[in-house]
Image (cartoon, rainbow, N blue to C red):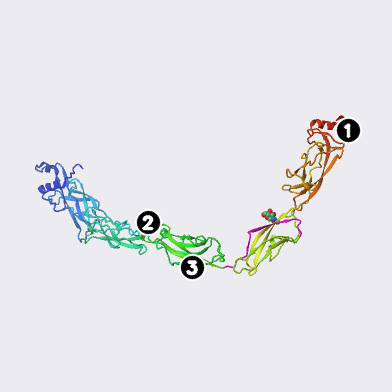
Amino acid sequence: MESQQKLPLSEARAIISKFTTTCHLTQQIICFFSVGSLRNGAAGFQRVKRGWVWNQFFVLEEYMGSDPQYVGKLHTDLDKGDSSVKYTLSGEGAGSIFTIDQTTGDIHALRSLDREEKPYYTLRAQAVDIDTNIPLEPESEFVIKVQDINDNEPKFLEGPYTASVPEMSPVGTYVTQVTATDADDPTYGNSARVVYSILHGQPYFSVDPKTGVIKTALPNMDREVKEEYQVLIQAKDMGGQLGGLAGTTIVNITLSDVNDNPPRFSKSKYWYLVPESSAVGSAVGRIKAHDLDIGRNAEVEYIIVPGDGGAMFDITTNEHNQEGIIILKRPLDYESKKAYTFKVEATNAHLDPRFQSFGAFKDTATVKINVLDVDEPPVFNKPSYVMDVYEDTPAGTIIGAVTAQDLDASGSPVRYSIDWKSDLDSYFDIDPVEGTISTNELLDRENIAQHNISVVATKLSDPVLTSRVAVTVHVLDINEFPPELASPYETFVCENSKVGQVIQVFSAKDQDLPSAGQQFSFRTHRIPLRTNHFFGMNVIQRRSGFRRRLQEIYLLPVVIEDNGYPPKSSTGTLTIRVCGCELDGSLLTCSAEAIFLPVGLSTGALIAILLCIIILLGNICFQRV
Ligand SMILES: *[C@@H]1O[C@H](CO)[C@@H](O)[C@H](O)[C@H]1NC(C)=O
């Protein structure tokens, strides 16, 4: 608004005190004045510009008086006190909260106000001619400010608080921070100046008066002694002075665990009675070292101190209850060792180096295990047995034996039997006392080549205690065919050949199966022939000077024997003719009936022989060759 002028308060005050007797600033008054006339210092006959001199009004909040609270006064210097000026009020709360006396310009507050609800009201004032309603002054805006009183106590909006701090923390360790807010005016007085103090919770914790930070105040607070603390914190305004308003909150502080305790066995000796029949891997005892800490810090590891027990037992931790489970690692045997004594150590799985120096961080207990004798079944001296029998073996022949013993102290005799389900056709018998196994009927390899029977050993003193063993019986093939020469052999020897000359190589065959592994031996006149490989034999000349004239044909008997069961042999005959030969050993002439085999024959001689055969009928062969 053009006509409105705001002046600094000091200037306005000076002007008003000088020129305007109706404006007493000791009262709360808003005055109209002539800016132009004042500035000029000239006689005020002409109003050049007019404006409100105004100060803001104050009204106390929470006013409890019975009469309306006086707020202030509007005034214009045009008002001569003759009731020709009418003051009006509009804006926030006009008419409802604030009223104005039209004539005097006095403003009152009709009800008590709350600064925290609404700190100021913006209103407009006007002075009009009471008759014409024509504004005498321009309308102007002013503020009624509600003045704070300390009517709000500090409040912990986030309380109650929970916090945690590790046990054994040093003094001054931060725990948490609490904050109280005060709704009163922080810019005016101390109504909103809050100071924190601890009402309950000393000497364990402290609170910073200004910041509300809570810290530990006692060293070595031990969770295992006291875990939960309830701390009462007060916030007081007016800087904590007497008469200030206060609010409180509870802070629940939990000490969190640190590993400041070692595991401890509740007793130093544990004693167990364990049957020797206990299965390897089974639990034979449980021990417990208790740890006052919790969670990770209470995790316990057990070890067996190297010595007597380590080879036989293991120890593991049950992760649910931290028990140590002693486990059997190898079979117990009462007969060989009746008791074990060993030490077990318990330590924390996760050590805290800060507390290791506090003392021994492990505990030791002694475990004694007595082995309990248990009647055990007999034990075979072999894990399994293999026996061989030929297929023609007569019924009743013993083919082998099994042996089982009662290793218990009782040393009971043992009785043997064949599990009938493993020998449905009763091929075999067993001597119940001796354990010898015999055939019950003839076995046929071509029908069943391998019998798998199960032999049961029973303790005579306690027939419930039995053990069994597998017996494999291989049925062996017997030797049915004698070996014989691979083919009928006929050969010759030269009249002029020397001793040691190889006359013939021959071989033998056998119809038995399998041929692999069969070995033959040869002899003639009871003299073994020199072997050059399994199936081949050389016939060697043993003397010289054969004469066709004296004997043209030799028949050489050869005995061939195999190594089967039972051994078989046959006698074959080698036909050896005496022939005339060249000096190099090639054949020249034989007797007419001779049949030649192409051994050492020269091509020329072979052609001559063939010619001889062709023209044999003409009886001229010998003359031509
Ligand atoms: C015995 O066991 C062997 C190997 O398992 C098998 O080949 C054979 O057939 C079995 N003999 C009988 C009679 O079941």
N-terminal-most mark, 3 or 2: 3
Q: Is residue 609 visible?
A: yes
At label 2, counting other C-alpha atoms closer than 10 Å, the crowd grade (few under 14, some 14-19, many 20 or more) is: few
Q: First in sequence, mark 3 or 1: give its number.
A: 3
Between 70 and 312, the one lying in front of the other is 312
Point out the stretch of residues depicted in magenta: 374-394
Distance between the alpha carbons at the discs numbered 3 and 2 = 34 Å
Q: Distance between the residues labelled 2 and 1?
A: 120 Å
Left or right: residue 132 versus residue 376 is left
Under 8 Å from ligand 1: the CB of mark 2?
no
**Residue farthest top in this picture:** 624
Query: Residue 376 lies in magenta, yes or no?
Result: yes
Left or right, 458 with respect to 362, comes to right
Q: Which residue position is annotated with label 2?
A: 353
Q: Residue 616 carries which label?
A: 1
Mark yes or no: residue 111 visible: no
Quadrant location of the N terminus in the rendered image: top left
Q: Mark 3 points at which residue?
A: 271
As drawn, 181 above or below 536: below
Q: Which amino acid does label 2 sit on?
A: Pro
Assess disc 1: are there few (<14), some (14-19) or many (≥20) residues with their C-alpha within 10 Å of its C-alpha: some
Image position, residue 346 (x, y; %): 44, 61
Relative height, residue 528 to residue 371 (above, below): above
Quarter location, residue 556: top right
**What quarter of the picture does the C terminus occupy?**
top right
Tag 1, which secondary structure? helix
Toward the viewer: 461 or 561?
A: 561
Residue positioned 15% across, 42% down in the render: 49
